[in-house]
Image: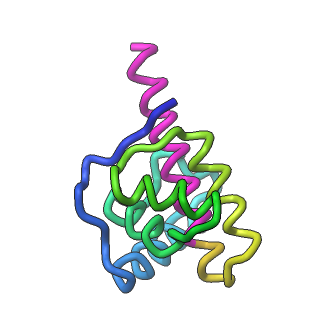
Amino acid sequence: MIISCRSAKSARDFAVVCEVRDVLARRAALARPPVSLAISDAAALGIAAIFSSRTPSGQVLERFHRTGRADSDELIEAARTEQGYASPEGHAALYCLIGWAQARIDRARAHVAS
């Protein structure tokens, strides 16, 4: 499924860090956080920018950062691959990017079902 951002501009690194911290804290405070509790489009693009590289997974993230669109399976797979090489903070940011993608998938499925 193709997912996309409504934001055309990515968040700067410091804003990404703050938003990841806040979303993770809010999710941790809930016993069963909803899928919709995710980072913003700008933060998703910012995370993609941070992890863009010449590797195959980094290229998926670079295309997503540049276009704001990606195949959800490819984006999630790329983020999971990058998690294997990331610092704990980077791992958390990529976890939030995966959560953002899953929220987009959930929203699209709900829209089709209605």
Quadrant of the rendered structure where residue 7 is?
bottom left
Residue 96 x, y percent position in the rendering: 54, 62
Check residue 53 for magenta coloring. no
Q: Is residue 67 left or right of residue 24?
A: left
Q: Quadrant of the C terminus?
A: top left
Write the residue at 43% across / 33% down.
107
Write the residue at 54% across / 59% down.
59
Depth check: give the residue in front, 78 or 30: 78
22 up-or-down from 76: above or below: below
Write the residue at 43% across / 28% down.
108
Residue 50 x, y percent position in the rendering: 47, 75
- Residue that sits furthest to the right in the current view: 84
* Span shown in magenta: 93-114
Depth check: give the residue in front, 35 or 93: 93
35 up-or-down from 62: above or below: above
Q: Is residue 42 left or right of residue 90?
A: left
Q: How many marks?
A: 0
